[in-house]
Amino acid sequence: MGISPHSRSAASGAFNSLRFTGGAFAPITAGYLGQVYGATVPFLIGAGAVGLGLVVLLGRFGEFGFAEPEPTH
């Protein structure tokens, strides 16, 4: 939540809204795709989403502003 330009509460609310909405529609969509196109299609779409998320995460890694560890003396 700390990397968002918005307040922590607004970023948290937006994240949770998206997460709960996806969690509500995912089982219905996966069941439909599994019946119409085959049982492996929902898993392939999920793997593609994970791969896309990894690409986005690695592409924006420098923007996260992680604190450097303090050197020990």
Image (spheres, rainbow, N blue to C red):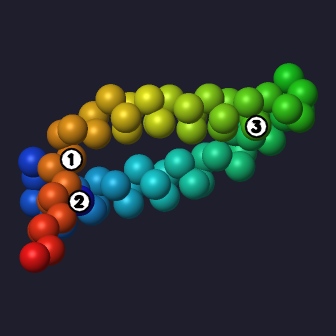
Tell me which numbered mark, 2 or 3, is placed earlier along the sequence.
Answer: 2
Marks 2 and 3 in Cβ contact (< 8 Å): no
Residue 51 in the image: x percent, y percent? 56, 32
The C terminus appears in which quarter of the rendering?
A: bottom left
Residue corresponding to mark 1: 64
Residue corresponding to mark 3: 43
Q: Residues within 10 Å of mark 3 (few under 14, many from 20)?
A: few
Residue 33 in the image: x percent, y percent? 78, 31
Q: Residues within 10 Å of mark 1 (few under 14, many from 20)?
A: few
Using residue 39 as the reference point, say whether residue 14 is left or right of it. Answer: left
Could you tell me which secondary element the residue under label 3 belongs to? helix
Which kind of residue does numbered mark 1 sit on? Phe
Which kind of residue does numbered mark 2 sit on? Met
In the foreground, 8 or 50: 50
Residue 37 in the image: x percent, y percent? 85, 23
Q: Report which quarter residue 32 is drawn in.
A: top right
Which kind of residue does numbered mark 3 sit on? Phe
Tell me which numbered mark, 3 or 1, is placed earlier along the sequence.
Answer: 3
Query: Spatial distance from mark 2 to mark 3, Cα to Cα?
Result: 29 Å
Asked whether residue 14 is in view, the answer is yes
Q: Residue at x 18, y 40 (%)?
A: 63
Residue corresponding to mark 2: 1
Query: Spatial distance from mark 2 to mark 1, Cα to Cα?
Result: 10 Å
Labels 2, 1: front one: 1
Against 31, residue 48 (above or below) is above
Using residue 50 as the reference point, say whether residue 73 is left or right of it. Answer: left
